[in-house]
Amino acid sequence: MAGERDVSRRGFLRTSGLAAVGGGVLSGKAGVLPGRAGDASSPVYHRQELKIQAHRTLGRTGFQVSDIGFGGGALTNPNVLAVGLDMGINYIDTAEHYVGGNSERAIGEVIRGRDRASIFLTTKLNLNFGGGSTKADLKRRFHACLERMQTDYADCLMIHMTPRVEEVQNESFHDAYQELKAEGRVRFLGLSNHGTEHSVWGRIESPMERVIGAAAEDGRFDAALFVYNFLQKDQGERIIEACRARDMGVTLMKTNPVGVVDQIVESAEEAKARGRLSEARERLVEDYRVWAQAAEDFKERHGVRSASEVRDASIKFCLSNPGVHTVCPTLNTFDDLEAAVALSGRTLSTAETPMLASYEDLLGPYYCRHACGICETSCPHQVPVNTISRYGHYFSAQGRQKQAIQKYAKLTGPKAEICADCDGHCEAACPFGVRARTLLTRAHENLTLA
């Protein structure tokens, strides 16, 4: 295993910050603006002079949100957010624990002194977080969020990663929310859900559709954050309809399922040459070859030069649904920001619809559907298939290598080191034909650097 980890370390150093289909670059490098945050004289700001082009009503909140929101899950550079607000983004999604609270701190640096009423700010509290979950605990933690964000109120407070249907009616959370609302500290109630998963805070037990559906039926929730993309569309569309029926605001995450096929064959061949592969791993090498060839076939068929073309179509797929109010991609660099804002007001073209269908046909087996988890009960080793695959996606497709490695290290219980030599119970149970052993083995190689 040491030889394979050596290969992973080299691959990490080579590909850190990159995401591609067959080698096309997806993400760029962050920079620091000269002068004050949000300075319109910045050369970055004027590179394309981009502006938000469309707004949608966020359900019964009545707020006109930009169709492109700001996902603050990896926010550390306040200048990126400042420029985003100058471009017209007015919806910000963050959470208590994002980047150890530094996402909220960065937001505080930016919104201080701006027109607060023009910004819709959502933060989230996890019910299983170590800070406690009594009413008093939740109020104290929320006030700490406000202090970090340097604001008197949040527009929406969400239950973060709502772990099970029963927690939709969590008495402590609702009591805390009602008191905070009466105090003028929060205006609206919401929830988020990734689907079934394992995390450092415990097992998330209920499927996404059941959780968000229960919130819609409950009637007290004003907005929701959940997964929807062109490869995970059926469940998402049912949730969107449930929210529409109750006039709930719909905000989206994980809108870009496009993965990375970069140096997979090379790293596998290096490991093979060193004699580090078992017979089962020999089969994985062949699967890596098939994966890479599928990417090349897709690129040739549609004239795709980089993954950014598919990423853009992925987001436009979501914007083409009138039930979607704002898409919240994780925006960590100026390039990420510009790419997202450039899509405001746009929908799928006639050429992009068959391109996405082709991607699903050729490369769909190499994307473990976010918020799924159907296969997990079939695993005799209780490997958290969906969670590990998501961390692998963070690493290879979103440029969030450090965060993905840290999350994987914190997982308790069995991990993916056993998956390459397994009989593939998860694959047999998967209704989407996902090559789970390949994805899990690749994720483990990337996420284990020691």
Image (tube, rainbow, N blue to C red):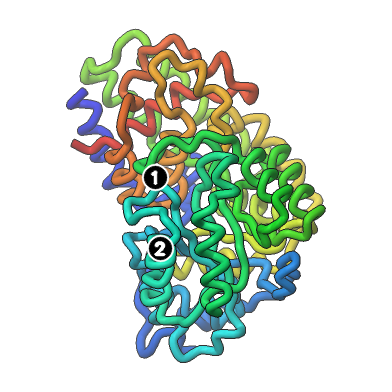
What residue type is disc 1 on?
Phe
- Residue at x 39% of width, y 45% of height: 395
What kind of element bears circle 2? helix
199 lies left or right of 260: left
Query: Which residue is at 72% across, 55% downward?
Result: 219
| Residue in view at x 66 percent, y 65 percent | 343
Mark 2 packing: few (<14 Cα in 10 Å), some, or many (20+)?
some
Whole-percent x, y for residue 375 in the image: 54, 22
- Above or below residue 302? Residue 273 is above
Can I make out residue 181 in this image? yes
Pointer 1 or 2: first along the chain: 2
Q: Amino acid at mark 2?
A: Ala
State the residue at coordinates (39%, 38%): 202
> Is residue 369 found left or right of 302 in the rendered image?
left
Residue 224 image-quadrant placement: bottom right
Q: Which residue is mark 1?
A: 395
x and y, in percent, of residue 137 in the image: 38, 60
Q: Quadrant of residue 327?
A: bottom right
Quadrant in the picture for the C terminus: top left
Give above or below for 91 relative to 211. Answer: below
